[in-house]
Image: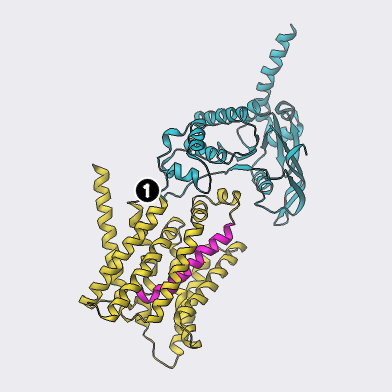
Amino acid sequence: MTEAFMIRAIIAGVGVAIIAGAIGCFVVWRKMAYFGDSLAHSALLGVALGLVMGISTNLGTIIICSIFAVTLIWLQQKKILATDTLLGILAHSALSVGMVTLSLLERSVDLHSYLFGDILAVTPTEIYYILFGGLIVLIFLYFNWSSFVLMTIDEKLAKAEGINIVLNQLQIMLLMTIVVAVSFKIVGLLLITSLLIIPAATARQLAHSPEIMAVVSSLLAVFSVIIGIYSSLHLDTPSGPSIVVASTLIFIMMSIFSLLIKRH
Amino acid sequence: MSYLIQAKDLCVNRHKKNILENVFVEVKKKDFITIIGPNGAGKSVLLECLMGSFQPDSGEIKKRENLSVGYIPQNFNPESSMPISVKRFLTLKRKSTPKELIDISKETNISEILEKNLSNLSGGELQKVLLARSLLNEPELLILDEPAQNLDIKNQLNFYNLLTRIYQKRELSILMVSHDLHMVMSSTRQVICLYHHVCCSGEPQTVAKDPEFISLFGNDMAKMMSVYQHTHNHSHQEDSQ
C-alpha cells in the first residue's frame, strides 16, 4: 500500500479535500452550488486551452475559470439577465467550445478522466499545484474570514460596515476557481460541486458555529476521499464517483443520526 | 461644526428618473429624526448615501471627523444554513470586552438569547440583536431603515420603547426611516417627509397639517393625525380654562 502512486493520490486527495470542504461551506451558505457547477463545466475549456497552448491544464483552467468569474460579476452588475440564466449561457458555451476544441486536437484525449477524475494518475506537478493553490485558499480564508461570514449573513449590514461586497464576492469566486482548477483531476469536472457541498451539508448538522462547520466539513471531505481512493483501488471503480458515493453515505448516516437525536 | 452629518443638494438619478432631487438633511447632536414617505420615495437610497455606501450623482455630504455610525438594515434575514450564535454574531468584526457585551445585552434585553442560533430568533429578537450589535461600536449616530417593519404591534411597541430608552440614556442621535406613523408622531421630535424631494419637515404636528403631507398620505392618515392633534389641543384648552 505504500507505492508511490498511492502516496501521491493520498496527498493530492487530502489537500483537495481540506480546501474543498472549507470553501464548500460558503457554497452552501451563499447558495453558489449552481455557480460551482458552471465553473466546473467551463473548466473543460481551460483543459482545452492548456493542451492547445502547451501549458499545464491546471493553469489553463485557472485562467479560463477566472475569466468566467470576472465576466459573471461584470454581467451581474449590469442586471440585464438573471444570474442563473447568465450562468447557463456562460457554462454551457464554455463547455461546448472546450469539447469542440478537444475533438479538433490531433492527439487523443482521455475525456473520461477529466469528467470523472483519475486520482491514481496524479503527477508530482499536479501535487505542487494542489499544495500551492491550497495554501493560497487557506491564507485568504484565514484573513478574510469574518468579512466573508458577515457578508454572507447580510450584505447590507456588511456594506454599511465598510466591507467591499463586490471585491469580497470576487475573492470567494476566485478561491472557488482555484479549488476547481486543482481538484478536477481528483473528482472530475462533473462531480466537483458534490465535493464542495456534500461534506458541508453534512457538517451543518453537527456544527454550532461557522468555524466549526468549516473544520468538520474539511475533515469529512478528507475521510470521504480516503475511503474513495481505497475503494477505487480495490474495486477498480472510477475515483471521482467513488469519493462522492463515500461522502453521500456519510451524509445519509449523519442525517439519520441527527434525526434520531432530535427525537430523543 | 454644529452637525454630525449633513447632506446638501443631494441628487440621485436612476434610469432617467430622479430618485432624489436637491435633498437637504442635517443631523445634529441628540436629534431624533424620522424620515417618512411612500414606497419608492428614495428613503433607503438617502440612507445609503449618508452612510457612504451609495455614490450620489451630485451634491455633497459632510460628516464630522471620525463619526461612528451604527446601522440597522431593512429586512434582516440571516441565512439559515449558517450555524452562528447570537454572541458570535455580536462580536463578529467587533473589538468588544466581555463586560461591554454583558452590559449591552442587558441594555437591549437579549441576555437570555446570547447562546441561541441566530436563524432561530423571532423578528423582535433579531431587531434587538441588531440594535445591540450597532451599540457595541458606541455610535454617535444610529441609522435605522424601517426597523419594525415585520413586527407585530406588540413587538413594534417594545422595540420603539427600547429605542426611546436608549436614546434618552445615551449621547446619540437617531435617523430612522419608518412607516409606523403613530409611533413617529408620538416619539419623534422631527419628521422629514420625503418624496424624491423634501416635501416638508419639522415637528410631527406641523408636518401633519402640511398640504403636501395630506396629498401624499391621503385623508385617512390626516384624520389619524388629527386624533393626535386633538389630544394635544385638548390639554391646551384645559390648561387655559
Q: Residue at x 37, y 48 (%)?
A: A208
According to the rendering, which colour does chain B have?
A: cyan
| Camera-nearest residue between B103 and A102 | B103
| Residue at image point 41% right, 42% down | B120
Task: Please identify which colour was used for chain A in the image.
Answer: yellow
Residue at image mark 1: A208
User: Would residue A195 appear left or right of A254 to someone viewing this image?
Assistant: right
Where is residue B29 drawn, in percent x and y?
A: 70, 34
From this viewpoint, is residue A62 visible?
yes
Q: Which quarter of the picture shows residue A33? A: bottom left
Q: Say if B66 sits above or below B161 in the image.
A: below
Q: Where residue B202 appears, x then y in whole percent? A: 74, 31
Q: Tell me which residue sits at (33%, 57%) in the image.
A: A202
The chain ID associated with circle 1 is A
Q: Which residues lie in the magenta part? A: A164-186
Up-down relation of residue B19 to residue B108 (above or below) = below
Residue A96 seen anywhere in this rendered image of the structure: no
Q: Nearer the viewer, residue A189 or A224?
A: A224
Please, is residue A222 above or below residue A256 in the view? below
